[in-house]
Amino acid sequence: MKATHCFYQDGEHKWVAIVRDPARPECLIDTNEYLVVHNGAGLLMDPGGAEVFPAVFSALSAEFDPGALAGLFASHQDPDIISSLALWLEFNPRLPCYVSWLWASFIPHFGGSAETFVAIPDEGMEINLNGLTLQAVPAHYLHSSGNFHLYDAKARVFFSGDVGAALLPPKSDPLFVENFDAHIRHAEAFHRRWMGSNEAKRAWCERVSRLSIDMLCPQHGAIYQGADVERFINWFDGLRVGIAAG
């Protein structure tokens, strides 16, 4: 069963990680889902695959009323990101899903209708969550051709999707990165293969380094915090990825 961890809270504003399902089949990649709550409304990021929906829904319900979800945010189109969409819409048919315009006609194969999707333009957009402004930040070709991350300037939390992901060994499941040098070894092969463009990587590093970030939260693996955020950005900036890394 997945567990919830509230890792930021300031009054009615909080961030929750839904992580680590020891009961999942070994053939499934482990995923992190994130919930941001402000003044009673919630936005769920990369809500996961259909096969983990019961675990995610159960863990979320222990922390937050799913009926108060104001929307879903899908960083890109992969099944481990958003194939649970039809099940979330069965629970609440009016739930909007924020996604790159590029995937607004592909993700409906998982469920939903034209009214379900809020298409994010390539340059990004602001998302209002009950008075909190969140910023959809472009991350195209890292690794999807239409890809977005989400920044909360108030909490200084940055949801980074697959950027920063690490495929951790069994029984290595810290919420936060504990030893950067040891941790990053589990991220290197993933980033070299799945990040398709050195030019896009450099643009992302420059864009994100201008933001004030206390915690960088990937969809797989552990959260980078404090000085490890800058360490990761610098490491990623210097890594050769995609075809050029072959």
Image (tube, grey):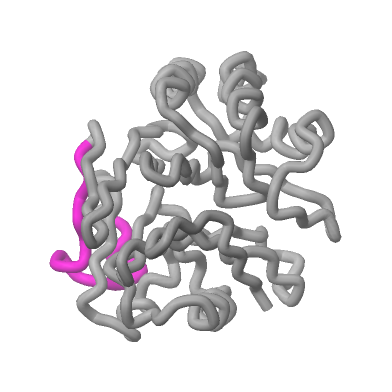
- Horizontal side of 4 relative to 82 (left or right) equals right
**Of 176 and 188, which appears nearest the observer?**
176
Determine the residue positioned at 41% across, 27% down: 211
List the single residue furthest toward the left.
115
Q: Is residue 117 magenta?
A: yes
Residue 108 placement: quadrant: bottom left
Q: How many marks?
A: 0
Where 243 sits versus 96, above or below? above
Residue 192 shows up from this direction: no
Residue 10 placement: quadrant: bottom left
* Quarter of the C terminus within the rendering: top right
Q: Is residue 113 magenta?
A: yes
Q: How far across and down, in percent of the image, does residue 3 sit?
A: 65, 72
Q: How far across and down, in percent of the image, does residue 173 sit?
A: 77, 56
* Quarter of the N terminus within the rendering: bottom right
* Residue span colored magenta: 106-121
Residue 16 shows up from this direction: yes
Residue 124 placement: quadrant: top left
Determine the residue positioned at 36% across, 68% down: 110
Determine the residue positioned at 14% across, 67% down: 115
Where 150 sits versus 89, above or below? above
**Of 236 and 246, which appears nearest the observer?**
236
Q: How far across and down, in percent of the image, does residue 219 sit?
A: 56, 51
Q: How far across and down, in percent of the image, does residue 226 sit?
A: 62, 34
- Horizontal side of 88 relative to 230 (left or right) equals left
Determine the residue positioned at 54% across, 82% down: 62
**Of 78 and 46, which appears nearest the observer?**
46
Where 191 sits versus 112, above or below? above
